[in-house]
Image (cartoon, rainbow, N blue to C red):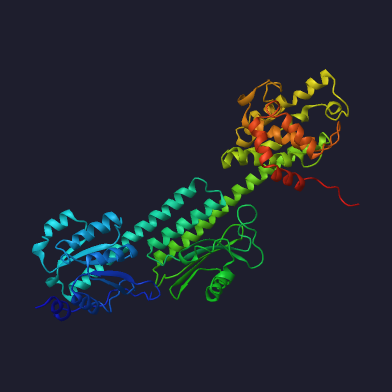
Amino acid sequence: MTDEDALVFADEETEAPGSSRDLAFQPKWKVIIIDDDPGMHDVTKLTLADFEFAGRGLSFISCYSGAEARDVLADHQDAALILLDVVMETEDAGLRIVRYIREDLDNWRSRIVLRTGQPGQAPERQVIANYDINDYKEKTDLTATKLFTLLCSSLRSYRDIVTIERNRHGLEQVISASANVFELKSMNRFAEGALEQLTALLHLDPSAVYMQKDGAVKGGLAATYTGNKMTILTGTGDFSSYTGRDAQTVLPPDIARRLDAAVKQRQSSCENDDFVGFFEDRAGGVNLTYMTGVGAINPVDMRLLELFIQNVSIAFENAQLHEDVASTQREIVYMLGDAVETRSEETGNHVKRVAEISRILAGAYGLDDDEVELIRLASPLHDIGKIGIPDAILNKPGTLDPEEWEIMKSHTELGHRMLAGSNRKILKAASIIALEHHEKWDGTGYPHGKKGDDIHIYGRLTAVADVFDALGSDRCYKKAWSLDQILVFMEEQRGHHFDPQGIDLFKAHLEEIVAVRERLLRRPAAG
């Protein structure tokens, strides 16, 4: 009996795979046949023409030599199964292909089954021990049912390997995001990773999307949602490019209708192989998940899907609470700085301009993002110690006498003492700035006459921002200088008052700094 006879005419019963899901829209399992006998290609395709596993059929790719197979394998590394002949143009052509797949292509996912009509050329024990293959079959032993069994076991193994890889990627997303879980970008990555893990764990289509509607998150963490807008916070698969967009404008109309129905009915639903998850958080925000390819889902998996949307929405809600606390802290810092401005009758928004200019300089200096933000938040308190300076000295229109000047200089140490006892990063940084922003690069500043790099970088950068803005503002003891006058002075003081690198960065980013200053100048109201 020939190999073809064994496959086509073996008197054994076959039965359809036990999958009840109608997932015809999912891609077919890719099977590559590598054999120099055209008849083996024909009989394999004929025998498996109606085969399905997990609701997905087969897509065949044929190669008739090891040389031809190399290019095909490089282009189709997502092949689930490779049916590989051993003896083709050379006696070990198939074995060379195994090494090429595993070592050169670094493909450890695809299942490789050796089919040989000449077992003496490649003894089974030797091949199994020395080559990373997943099964070894003599062609004469492959009846239709045995081929069916081989396909089911190979595809199940491939599916589980892909599931593990997807879960690993999703877990990496979750772990990576956890370090900065209260940032919007990290929260989106957290949700994306969790979504990837969930779809992989339940063997679902990887296309899924997570949304919030009608003010579920407001303010700094994400966008402000109004009306019926339903904003996509993260998506996977076909929806991965939709993050930040309105679900009702980018998703198909039938999906949008399903989402609206879930909101109206205030419950999750599963129909037509799709799942729509609904959860309302404590603030009344509506959270939705849409997943495709769910099919006939059991109650345990349904609960898992609902738990996903519930927990991710709670995580976003907690992140928003964190952002509210941080916003309140920033607002208090600005209010304290404004209080000093008001008391000293200085030009409005000085502390905000110093904050933004310090941020620009810190970023240009190469400080990391956290420190850049820290100096932006802390620098508004540079003159907080002036609260302890008498009004007569603080707002004196003329030159201070030596005694008054000593009292005025004490505002640096007063501010430092006010802030240094805090364990909060912002206030600790602010205490450094309050103490050192009047130190000078050449050592002639106060209160301690520090010199060069001994002056903290926060103090050095804030000094540039503070002096630049102060010179361009009206004060009780002087009129505002022109920009040209200020630039001449700043250059003259390079290496004397100011850190030379700070002045170089100031000049390099002058256009941006001037734009910030113009934007934050307080203009008088029309009367």
Using residue 470 as the reference point, say whether residue 191 is left or right of it: left
Vertical placement of residue 448 versus 335, above or below = above
Q: Residue furthest right?
A: 527
Using residue 166 as the reference point, say whether residue 462 is left or right of it: right
Give x and y (percent) for residue 173.
Answer: 45, 52
Residue 334 is at least partly visible in this image: yes
Using residue 298 as the reference point, say whether residue 220 is left or right of it: right
Give x and y (percent) for residue 244.
Answer: 58, 61
Residue occupying image coordinates x 88% and y 27%:
398
Residue occupying image coordinates x 63% and y 52%:
220
Query: Which of the 4 quarters of the picture holds residue 405?
Result: top right
Residue occupying image coordinates x 70% and y 32%:
463
Query: Which of the 4 quarters of the picture holds residue 352?
Result: top right
Q: Residue furthest top?
A: 403
Camera-side residue: 278 or 249? Answer: 249
Camera-side residue: 21 or 358? Answer: 358
Vertical placement of residue 201 versus 361, above or below = below
Give x and y (percent) for residue 195.
Answer: 46, 60
Give x and y (percent) for residue 100.
Answer: 25, 58
Number of numbered labels in the structure image: 0
Query: Which of the 4 quarters of the picture holds residue 460?
Result: top right
Residue 377 is at least partly visible in this image: no
| Quadrant (top left, top right, bottom left, bottom right) of the N terminus | bottom left
Vertical placement of residue 315 versus 276, above or below = above
